[in-house]
Image (spheres, rainbow, N blue to C red):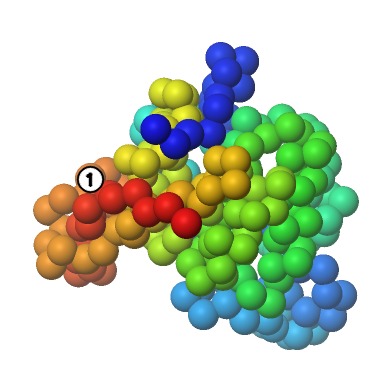
Amino acid sequence: MTSIRNGEKDMIRKVLLLNGPDDRVNSVMIRSGDRWPHRLPRKITKQVPHAYPFWIAQCGAVLKQRGYEVRYVDSIAEDLGIDGTVQRFLEEKPDLVVVATSTPTIHTDLLMARLAKEKAGAKTVLVDTHVTVFHQELVAEPFVDAAVRGEFEMAIPELADALNQGGDLSSVSGVTWKRGVRWWSTRTARCSGTWTNCHGPIATWCRATSTSWGFAPRTPVSW
């Protein structure tokens, strides 16, 4: 069994979902609400609306269904910056911080994961586009506990459940984590041609968009 150790006092109860800050002064990052992350010049963002971080919202809805306390922090929309985001960590004291990533902001994303670990003592999980390609390199960071490849709306609640049940992540789709010097990874979820396997808010979204969802076999792979 491969696991992340999780004692009784470290049970996951509060999850903070982070659409983190952009450290560039003259631009604003559009990340979690867009399939193709990009920057906009800050001077035109009053005319161009911020993308709503719907992937994070979907994930939060499922977490709430499973009884978790959820906090959303959208550093872009709230213009929190790095210091303001860290202050939220200190105020909320989350047990788990889920950090949305993109290639243009990955250095800041990693900084926020490190600060979540250092300042709040939270477990940290990276999600979204950059993670899907560079999951092994990112999980090598000592302050990153796991990375979820591909869609993460269902994987994060499953990961939180797994941590609370002893830390064995081998049943969670699309997750990469480390134990000692070895890498472990499970297969990602994939389309099955039907949305009948979907439940709750994900099913509602699938029906509204005619999107097909399903799950691939969850076979752990080690490096």
Quarter containing the N terminus: top left
Which quadrant of the view contains residue 31? bottom right
Image height of 161 relative to 112, above or below: above
Which quadrant of the view contains residue 106? bottom right
Asked whether, in this view, residue 176 is left or right of residue 116, the answer is left
Residue 207 visible? The answer is no
Residue in the image at 41% along x and 23% along y: 165
User: How crowded is the residue under tag 1: few (<14 C-alpha within 10 Å), some, or many (20+)?
Assistant: few
* Residue 19 x, y percent position in the rendering: 63, 57
Along the line of sight, the residue nearer the viewer: 6 or 33: 6
SS label for mark 1: loop
Along the line of sight, the residue nearer the viewer: 24 or 108: 108
Residue in the image at 56% along x and 68% along y: 134
* Residue 142 x, y percent position in the rendering: 71, 47
Residue position for label 1: 199
Amino acid type, callout 1: His
